[in-house]
Amino acid sequence: MTKMAAWGLLAPALFTIGSLGCTRSQADLAGRTTGAGGILGTESLGGSPGLSGVGESTTCTTDTLTGSGGRAVTSPGVASSPEFAPQLGATSSQAVAPPAISGGTLLVLSDGNTVVASDPDRDSVYVVDLPSRALTRTIALQPGDEPGRLVEDGAGHVHVALRGGGALVTCDPATGAIIARRPICAGPRGVAYDPATDRVHVACHDGQLVRLPAAGGDPDRRLQLDDDLRDVVVDGDRLLVSRFRSAELLTVASDGTVAGRAQLPGFTSPQVHQGAAYTASVAWRTLPAPGGGVVVLHQRGMVDPVRPAAGGYGGPNTCDTIVHGCITRVDRDGNSRTGPALASLVLAVDMALSPDGTQVAIVAAGNATNTDAAVGDTTTPALTRVFVTDLDDATDPNFGCSMDGKHAPCPQGRMVATGGATGVAGARGSGGAVGAGGAVGAGGAVGSGGAVGLGGRIGAGGAIGAGGAIGAGGAIGAGGFVGSTGGTIGAACTPPPAGVPVNVGQPIAVGFDGSGRLIVQSREPAMLALGDGTTISLSTISRADTGHTLFHANSGGFLACASCHAEGNEDGRTWNFSCEGPRRTQSLQVGLADTEPFHWDGSETDFGRLTTDIFQGRMSGPALATDQQTALLGWLDRQPRLPKPDMVDPAAVSRGQALFQDPAHGCAICHAGPHMTNNQTVDVGTGGRFQVPSLIGVGTRAPYMHDGCAPTLADRFGPCGGGDQHGVTSTLSADDVSDLVAYLKTL
């Protein structure tokens, strides 16, 4: 049995007794209990935590938790290398850092035989003829344009949103000519074409929704909506617009008013993290749904407390990461169906629907670097990078996490022998504690020559169901596979359909041609991969960068840095950490070098310790060499940053800057220097001592404060902002606050 399979059987018991380092130094803000009738104990005593008396409070600190035999399990991380560690090769860095992966850069034209692909890494657009398997045109753009989403209009021209260039470029795919380049907004992202009006709609990072004549000319409408817009879909006479980090869906009526807002549904399942609650965030891709409405590929993040300990973010169990991808369908009438966790598909950044609307293809950019497996004379990826299934299965709310080939990919190499039905699982014990100094099972073994037994309990220093089997004589189901915690263990795994390419490089986009054949775009190397095994090179220029690769790689714990720091920034979430309470994800687009220490409490003294504690420890990744750590930090600090919104009121900005720099208010005492922080850990009346955050890019980082208590920048000056301990703000008028906000948005 492989490590992941064994983990799937043991995780219910181990997570029940697993905890974080706890002493009597700080009250546990989460207050969760563990075990039957008791709360997790306070002393490690050289072994697993003991059980305290009924009714005692769990107390916590960031001290290292020691497990069986005194082994440290928080830092430096897991005891052994992950089964699917990322393969990084020789360390390299690009002089011009490549942008973070955003996905959705592939378009199949209406003829069904021509593909147009954006390349944000090389600032190019490619035209490929599928029947001849030939690259026919390369359209060079300006450095830093970062082309993204594309759409075809009624004349056969292609409009490309230039995320870095702030413009919409229109190309003729037949000739490769650039017909027009029109300035649009700060950070155009989504683009859609309305054939009824012959208009192109562009959704922007700064909240603008812009309408332009497809044939050329200036915009004929600009709407200012909420910021962080992502995709736009024409749905009859209305527009459906997604927001990236919040995964909110806006309905814009034909007159330009916002007629509705919808938050994608929450999720909980006993098959995922022992029934923890999850909420939607980070809407990577939104597409028109068959029959109206939309289909959204997005992430879900855990609401329940996160353990800041080894494996606390993710580990061998694919169903138990704190972040996972999923698909939600929202029909035209507003009804929605959110599907199961896309287990093992790390960083699912793009999807496509088949021409008949029945199938969906998903690419997992995060699995591009994980261990390959030798099969015969060929080497194939050990983890699925392209997954194709029925849309109904991908949005089936009756499944939580099932790696059965229909609701998530089959687990690699985890098919087991046939046998009887799965028996009844053993209980987790009746209040029994893992004894002081005791391991899980005698000498650390699982049972006395057995597995989790029927009715077996976690005894005091004893085994888990000594000698017991899984269920009453039952074997793992016929042709079945070992599921993750609470996941399916049963019928044979459905193999992938024919025509799904396997060796696809680092996939960032996917599409179907007119006959329903799959096409996958790879970032590195730059190529298209087809279902018959053919690859079409798009460019021979390499953009390989170790820092970029590490940031997007499946750590081995089935999540990536980019899972929480989407597009190199942050996910908009406020996480609930055991022992710490709510903590807002921090931006990585502020310049990290020379701003140590890191994290809100300043506990990560330098970047090396940060990678050891987080990537190796909480994310269950391998140890990183010093040059790899340096490459990661270098890429983070050199990556292209989100564009600043246009200055709407220069006079207000000037007044706000004067207020900010006025010693009477004290803002610039802490928020100063090139990073707009003095790197101190201070108490500003918000509930403890916290690191002074950088204000670079603060205008697009709502919600604010360490606990996300301020929905807007203006709210930061309200009740949760710390009062006059956090700058002297009580003397500010409403107009002063408005001017300060205008200035802060320019940083």
Image (cartoon, rainbow, N blue to C red):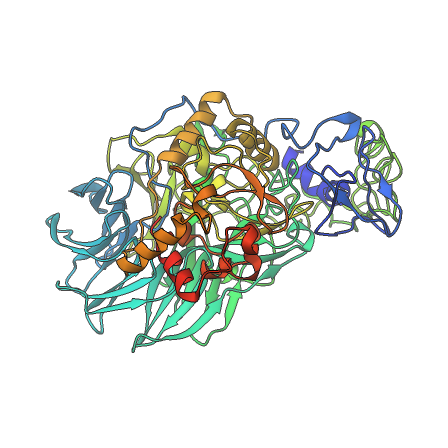
**Residue positioned 47% across, 36% down in the render:** 553
Image position, residue 76 (x, y; %): 63, 27
Q: Is residue 426 left or right of residue 665?
A: right
Image position, residue 562 (x, y; %): 46, 42
In the image, 691 versus 118, the foreground residue is: 691
How many marks overall? Answer: 0
Q: Is residue 412 left or right of residue 48?
A: left
- From what the image shows, is residue 142 above or below residue 685? above
- From what the image shows, is residue 157 above or below residue 615? below
**Where, quadrant-wise, is the N terminus in this rendering?**
top right
In the image, 439 versus 681, the foreground residue is: 681
**Residue positioned 40% across, 42% down in the render:** 589
Image position, residue 433 (x, y; %): 86, 41
Q: Is residue 293 left or right of residue 269?
A: left
Residue 128 quadrant: top left
Report if residue 67 is visible in the image: yes
**Residue positioned 46% across, 42% down in the render:** 669
Residue 713 quadrant: bottom left
Image position, residue 685 (x, y; %): 60, 51
Report if residue 340 is visible in the image: no
